[in-house]
Amino acid sequence: MRSAVPPLPTNTVCADILAKITPWPLLPGLAEPDVLTFSVQWDTILNDAITTAFTADPLDANERQILKTVIARVNLTEAQPTDGAASGVVLAGFGEDELFPVLWNCYIRSVLPSRALQRNSPQLEPLQMQGGAMIRPFAQAEMVHSFMNGIDPNLRFTIENGVDELVRRFADHLAGTSGLTGAPLATFRADALATATSLNQGFRKQIEKYCREKHVDPVLGAIGLLPKDQLAVMAETLVSLTSFKRKMSRDAETVGGDVDVAVISKGDGFIWVKRKHYFPPELNLRYIKRIEKDQV
């Protein structure tokens, strides 16, 4: 028979979570007092949510406060790589002084009254003369990375980590069969692990070099010579490829439907190449004529 394991008290669980996330750095521009400010400003909403979530087992005042602090810190700290609650903001185009396009992007993690909080520091990427061309995917980017590097990023991560584990285990096995003991064994084991680390770093560099020479550089070189209309076709194709992959897999279909395509250039400005409408224009000629008349 299996013995039932009693659940941990809520305050113990919350205190454990709080201890783990407290070392996480706060978002840029925030300080410790902002954590309390968040709890105070959202106190009513947090209380209502906690009451609804713990109807069967109400929390006391101390447990509620710990949980509120957890919620505040989760919203106000630098998000971890696995965080899926952030929204991306991307701006691209030309200013009055730029000869080449500039890309600016950041993640928005949460919002305080009258203040949007960035999940991380914004990234600014101006296209340089020597750069020629660049491709920057956002959100669901794995298919673009596969296209650019010639290998699925998750597969590459699995291979590199698998090789790392293999050489480390081999180094440890050699140390175990060396017949050494004491200080000589410790020295041999350290040298073997250092060699394993060096071999793995060399393997990763070889993979990176191959991807760069055989895939990334040729693709960027070709893209740098494409006319604007072909650049638009390429961008739409990459988005459609991601949508198709999502549809054919068990992953959530977060990319799909019709794709809007636009081109921004220094001479022409913002130009729609393909744009979906909520109604077929050919079935609403009166509306189209009215709009054209208003624009005259």
Image (cartoon, rainbow, N blue to C red):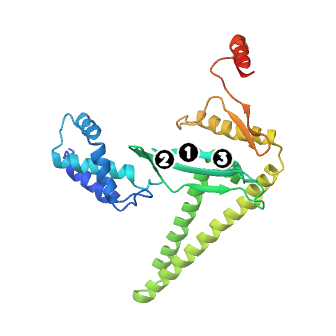
Nearer to me, 78 or 245:
78
Which residue is drawn at the image coordinates 45% and 77% (left, top)? Answer: 176
Nearer to me, 203 or 68:
68
Residue 277 on image: x %, y % = 65, 23
Where is 180 relative to 193, above or below?
Answer: below
Where is 84 relative to 179, above or below?
Answer: above
The amino acid beneath tag 2 is: Ile
Q: Residues within 10 Å of mark 1 (few under 14, many from 20)?
A: few
Dot 1 falls on a residue whose secondary structure is strand
Tell me if 123 is positioned left or right of 38 in this view: right
Residue 197 on image: x %, y % = 55, 73
Which residue is drawn at the image coordinates 78% and 62% (left, top)? Answer: 130
Distance of label 2 from label 3 (alpha carbons): 17 Å
Q: Quadrant of the C terminus?
A: top right
The amino acid beneath tag 1 is: Val
Nearer to me, 145 or 104:
104
Dot 2 falls on a residue whose secondary structure is strand
| Residue that label 2 marks | 108
Where is 72 relative to 20, above or below?
Answer: above
Distance of label 1 from label 2 (alpha carbons): 7 Å
Residue 42 on image: x %, y % = 30, 42
| Residue that label 1 marks | 89
| Residue that label 3 marks | 92
Which residue is drawn at the image coordinates 83% and 43% (left, top)? Answer: 227
The amino acid beneath tag 3 is: Ala
The reply to whether the C-beta atoms of the residues labelled 1 and 2 are less than 8 Å apart is: yes
The image quarter in which residue 233 lies? top right
